Image: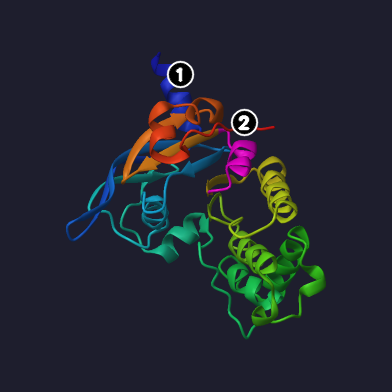
Amino acid sequence: MSKHIREESSKNRILSVERLSMKFGGLIAVNDVSLHVEKGEIVGLIGANGAGKTTLFNLIAGVYKPTAGKIFFEGHAVQGLPCQRMCHLGIGRTYQIVKPFSNLSVLDNVMVGALERHNRVARARAKAEEIIELVGLSHRRDVSGEHLNLPELKRMELARALATEPKLLLLDEVMAGLNPVENARVIDIVRKLNDRVGITVIVIEHVMKAIMTLSHRIFVLNQGRLIAQGAPEVVTNDPEVIKSYLGEKRYDKN
């Protein structure tokens, strides 16, 4: 590969993780992981429960300081920065377990995210209204979080992350517990964000049809280690991935 090509590739890279590890006492949750994500990609992150996926998200988002390794966001080393700083830099995320402000309305929940970028309440409200329309919650704008069903909570969680106006969006099982119709709705939202707004997305998901449909590339973790990466069709037919995660099943986009 020529120097010129390497420079172009680096210029288009939004995230690089280099030899990242995270230990909790004697447990190694993330073990010497290296990966990169290009601007505008949708990347899937899969693996069995306990494989280290959410821990990796927490490292990227600034919840944890890594035991070893480096994280580069838009070319700058960011490992160890607090999560509020990561958010300000442009890394947004959802949580595997939804965390609404139960006593606040949908609009106010999303405004919490919008206030990261807009210190004027009127502007934050306008941004929140724009986003809840995008995720299909305008008709529920005044309903409190405690009265939402699971699909609505998932979309509100997504909306609150979007309100921070991220460049990189980390989605942690936003389709878990949803039926196929609801999954299709979330897939459509993510595609629109990627196509129209250009947001780069890393998505953790056990719904393999969704991962296969959305992802340009897939990373696979097993016991904290990265065991495979590449195009969906390649990764899901990798013998080690089949053995550690998929069993004898095969998946395609159809």
Q: State the SS at label 1.
A: helix
The disc, 2 or 1, on the residue closer to the chain's N-terminal end is 1
List the residue tagged with mark 1. 5
Separation of marks 2 and 1 at Cα, in angstroms: 32 Å
Residue at the extreme bottom: 103
Label 2 packing within 10 angstroms: few (<14), some (14-19), many (20+): few
Which of label 2 and label 1 is nearer to you?
2
Residue at horizontal 42%, vertical 57%?
61
Extent of the magenta region: 206-216
List the residue tagged with mark 2. 252
Query: Main structural element of the magenta stretch: helix, strand or loop?
Result: helix
Residue 251 drawn at (x, y percent)? 58, 33
Q: Nearer the viewer, residue 138 or 236?
A: 236
Residue 109 is drawn in which quadrant?
Answer: bottom right
Quick one: quadrant of the C terminus? top right
Residue type highlighted by circle 1: Ile
Q: Nearer the viewer, residue 252 or 45?
A: 252
Give residue 89's mark: none
Residue 127 drawn at (x, y percent)? 71, 66
Residue 119 drawn at (x, y percent)? 60, 73
